[in-house]
Image (cartoon, rainbow, N blue to C red):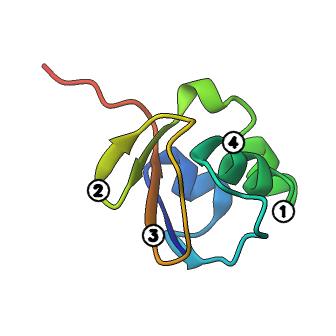
Amino acid sequence: MRVLYFAWLRERVGLAEETVSPPPEVRTVADLITWLRSRGEVYEAALADPSIVRVAVNQDYARPDHPVQAGDEIAIFPPVTGG
């Protein structure tokens, strides 16, 4: 699974992207965020409030209950505002 971090999330995690192999119990976007948070202080700080991050799975916006699986591309980013 390829995880991409954007904007201030990239700065806080210290990576633009990484390849991860979550355990089998990680089945949804919410599970993935919880698992990522457990990986260390920088992840916990960056993802402390999941309500202020957005996620796309394979370039489609995804809700917390959206399934994830090996081979997916997961993008994690702050809400986007436009004008």
Identified by mark 4, the residue type is: Leu
Q: In this view, does 33 lie to the left or right of 23?
A: left
As rendered, which of 12 and 34 lies closer to the eye? 34
- Regarding mark 3 in the picture, which secondary structure is present there? loop
Q: Residue 72, image x and y in percent?
A: 45, 69
Residue named by callout 2: 59
N-terminal label among 4 and 1: 1
From the image, tell me which residue sits under label 1. Answer: 39
- Element marked by disc 2: loop
- Provide residue 11's location: percent of width, then percent of height: 57, 56
For the residue marked with disc 2, what is the amino acid?
Answer: Gln
* Marks 4 and 1, how far apart at CA: 11 Å
CA distance separating discs 2 and 3: 10 Å
Image point 58% across, 47% down: which residue?
29
Instruction: Verify CB contact (< 8 Å) between mark 2 and mark 3.
Output: no
Point 52% across, 46% down: residue = 8
In the image, residue 80 sits, relative to residue 9, either above or below, namely above
